[in-house]
Structure formats: structure tokens, C-alpha cells
Amino acid sequence: MTKHDTELLVCVKCRRGAEEPENGIRPGQALHDALAGQGLPEGVTLRPVECLQNCDHGCSVALRGGPGRWTYVYGNIDENEHLATLAEGASLYHESADGLIPWRSRPEHFKRNCIARIPPLENDNG
Amino acid sequence: MTKHDTELLVCVKCRRGAEEPENGIRPGQALHDALAGQGLPEGVTLRPVECLQNCDHGCSVALRGGPGRWTYVYGNIDENEHLATLAEGASLYHESADGLIPWRSRPEHFKRNCIARIPPLENDNG
């Protein structure tokens, strides 16, 4: 089985419920740019997206990794506080077979800020 | 281009934040069963799933339809009130090229209860 790359999707349009920032750089874009600057674990690709429509609980990211994995949407992401959490979470996701990060190793922010998840395409579980 | 089927995923574990019902049939399961009984538009497949992790705003469904379409998660679904809305929304989604239902034809409940969306796999938009 080929291991699929993991995508870390970042909503770059997120204003986190506030007005357009004076400097024109929205929190979602700042989050994306900070992640791009930090670099991500092996096998994880950063991808800017227009809007994940989780506007009430931004900033927002999603983790996706091929037809055999659950896709997860996480919210309430801070572009300064959560960079290491996102790198760690993306790495754990990428290491998983089905996208499920065991609860005990799951980053605390992921435990409490999962907005939704979408099942794999290839899945007999229901 | 082959037109992909549309999946209407229903979280059958949803308790809508309440205790286990006395009759043992959770609202999510009741929603699924009612949709199965009603039937769905041509090209739309109903699929029960274990948990979409939108537990604060259940019941929950998702619409998915191949690598070229956005996937949408909708919440606050009522198993009695929203059956026709779901059939209509699934049909409109299925007719769309990319999963976007034009705002004017979008069901009212979909306008106000989108929990999140995930971009297509094949997309140059960011």
C-alpha cells in the first residue's frame, strides 16, 4: 500500500470574527505564513484554502491524507500559540493508518477543538 | 467526465446532547432510518457513519461527491423537520459541478447551519 501524503489545509481567509486587520494580513493568512516559515514534518504538505466555513470558531485547519483516512477539521487555532501543536498533530496524523490519533497522544488542543470529521472513502465501518 | 455519486453521510450515533433515549433509538439513527424510508434523489446514496464529531450541534450530516467537489458538513438537523430539506439539498448538491449550491437556491437550513467544508482534491483554487 502506498502511503499517502498528508495535507494540512489552512483557511487563509479567516478574520476570526473581527474586522479586516489594519495591516491587511488576516489571522488565517498569518497562520498559513507562520506554518510555511516554520516548516512541517516529512510527508505533510501545507495548502492554503479559501474558506473552510468554520467562521464562528476560527482560525481553522483540516488534516486529510488519502482515501483510507478520516479527515479532521480543527478550530480555535491561534497563529502564534498553536504552531508546534499543529506540527505535532500533523505528524501524528501522518503516522496513523486511518487518521485516528490515539487519545493519549492526541494534542490537548485537538481533543477539545475538533469541529467535525469526515470518514474515509474506503471504509466498511457503516 | 464521469459523474460521481453523491453520498449523504448521517451520524447515527448522535444523541443531540441528551441522554440515551428510553427506546434506545438515538436521534441520529432515527434520522438515518427516516431518510432510508423516504428514499433519496437519483444518484444520492445514504450512508450511516459512526460519528462526525459535531456533537455540540447535532444531528449531523455530510454531503460528499467525488474528488472534484467540496464536502459539506451540516448541523442542527432534526429527524422530523428536515427530511425534505435534506433530499432537496442532496439533489442540488448532486446537480452541481463542484459541490457549491448557488446561494439563492440553497435551502435555508443549509445557509445557516454549515459546520465546515473541505475542498476538492482536484482544485487549483489555492
Image (cartoon, coloured by chain):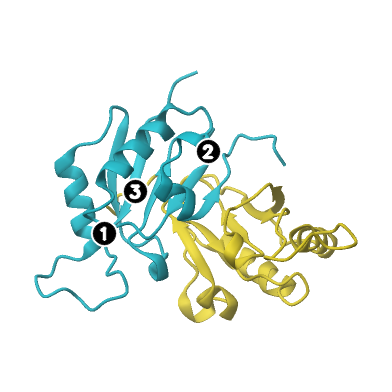
Chain colours: A yellow, B cyan
B36 vs A86, nearest the viewer: B36
Residues at badges 2 and 1 in contact (C-beta under 8 Å)? no
Q: In this view, does B17 lie to the left or right of A23?
A: left
Instruction: Identify the residue at horizontal 16%, vertical 73% (top origin).
Output: B21
Check the residue under mark 1 and report the chain it is in. B
Instruction: Identify the residue at horizontal 28%, vertical 31% (top origin).
Output: B41
Q: Is residue B107 left or right of residue A106?
A: left
CA distance for labels 2 and 1: 28 Å
Q: Name the residue under label 1.
A: B12
CA distance for labels 3 and 1: 9 Å
Instruction: Identify the residue at horizontal 88%, vertical 63% (top origin).
Output: A22
Check the residue under mark 2 and report the chain it is in. B
Closer to viewer: mark 2 or mark 1: 2
Looking at the rendered structure, the secondary structure element under dot 2 is helix
Circles 3 and 1 on the same chain: yes
Is B63 situated above or below B50?
Answer: above
For the question of whether residue A55 can be seen, the reply is yes
Hey, what amino acid is under mark 2? Answer: Trp
Hey, what amino acid is under mark 3? Answer: Leu
